[in-house]
Amino acid sequence: MAGRKTVELEVYLDLLSQPCRAIHIFLNCNKIPHKVKTVAIRKGENRTPEYTKLNPMQKVPVMVDNDFVLTERGISPPSSCYSDAILKYLATKYDVPGNWYPRHPERRARVDEYTAWHHTNTRPHAAKVFLMEVLLPHMTGQPADPLKVERALADLSDTLEKLENMFLKRQPFLCGDDISLADLLAMCELMQPLGGGRDILKDRPKLLSWKSRVQSALGDSFGKAHTVLYSLRDRSKAKL
Ligand SMILES: N[C@@H](CCC(=O)N[C@@H](CS)C(=O)NCC(=O)O)C(=O)O
């Protein structure tokens, strides 16, 4: 029928943003019909009057499901911000396999337990390495400060150890035997330093095996969402 709206779910994303990639992967992996509207942060598209009306916090991601607008409210890293509201909404509303965000109270609480921890650990610590090595040098034209990078890497290392020794101690995925929103959010964050050519998982066999389990559970959607980050990595390698 002419003019009939077929796609009602819209997401506003910049694939250089970690939580945006998590949403992109989740939607594609679960074949949820949606439309992507690209908001390029580097071009200031998150600060236009039109976008500010949609999300006064001027952040990505944003989801619009019919008339329901869900924005990610947060302050820039390294402060805490909350990137899981959209994913939890999508997993609850759409018919996706139960492993993503289990309905069983205890299993769901395990995912919530990780995502609460994520916002003050995995997210700010991995983001800070990217900030120091990629964003700040790009914005100021000055090289990264080695001391600040070293401090950021030490914080991140502490987080990686907790992921290995607590969350993955006796199970293949962060919250149990199958992939959940926790693994998706965590992996998208841990990929971010790669944009500066830094593979933070390369000397950590336990995390590398987890990464390959996560990647095979996500299939093509993982590579697709990371294409832009991979080109940034290739450009930064070319500079070294
Ligand atoms: N609460 C959000 C925060 C979103 C957020 O910090 N988005 C960043 C990209 S990852 C952003 O939009 N930054 C643009 C800016 O601060 O100008 C989340 O964790 O998803």
Image: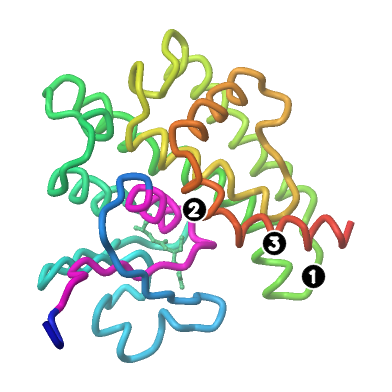
Q: Is residue 54 above or below residue 211?
A: below
Q: Earlier in the sequence, mark 1 or mark 3?
A: 1
Q: Which residues are magenta?
A: 5-28
Q: Residues within 10 Å of mark 2 (few under 14, many from 20)?
A: some
Image coordinates for residue 185, horizontal then vertical, percent: 41, 42
Which quadrant of the figure shows ligand 1? bottom left
Indicate which disc residue 232 carries. Answer: 3
Which coloring applies here?
rainbow
130 is within the stretch colored magenta: no
Q: Secondary structure at mark 1?
A: loop
| Residue type, mark 2 in image | Pro
Q: Is residue 116 above or below residue 87?
A: above
Indicate which disc residue 1 carries. Answer: none
Image coordinates for residue 19, horizontal then vertical, percent: 41, 54
Indicate which disc residue 78 carries. Answer: 2
The single residue placed furthest to the front in the displayed view is 1
Image coordinates for residue 130, horizontal then vertical, percent: 63, 54
- Give the residue at x 69% y 61%: 231
- Give the residue at x 38% y 62%: 75
Q: From the image, which quarter does the C terminus lie in? A: bottom right
Relative to 111, is 142 on the left or the right?
A: right
Q: Is residue 138 above or below residue 154?
A: below
20 is within the stretch colored magenta: yes
Q: Secondary structure at mark 2?
A: loop
Relative to 100, is 25 on the left or the right?
A: right
The single residue placed furthest to the top in the displayed view is 170
Relative to 45, is 110 on the left or the right?
A: left
Q: Is residue 12 above or below residue 181?
A: below
- Frontmost of labels 1 and 3 is 3
| Residue type, mark 3 in image | Leu
- Give the residue at x 73% y 42%: 150
Q: Residues within 10 Å of mark 1 (few under 14, many from 20)?
A: few
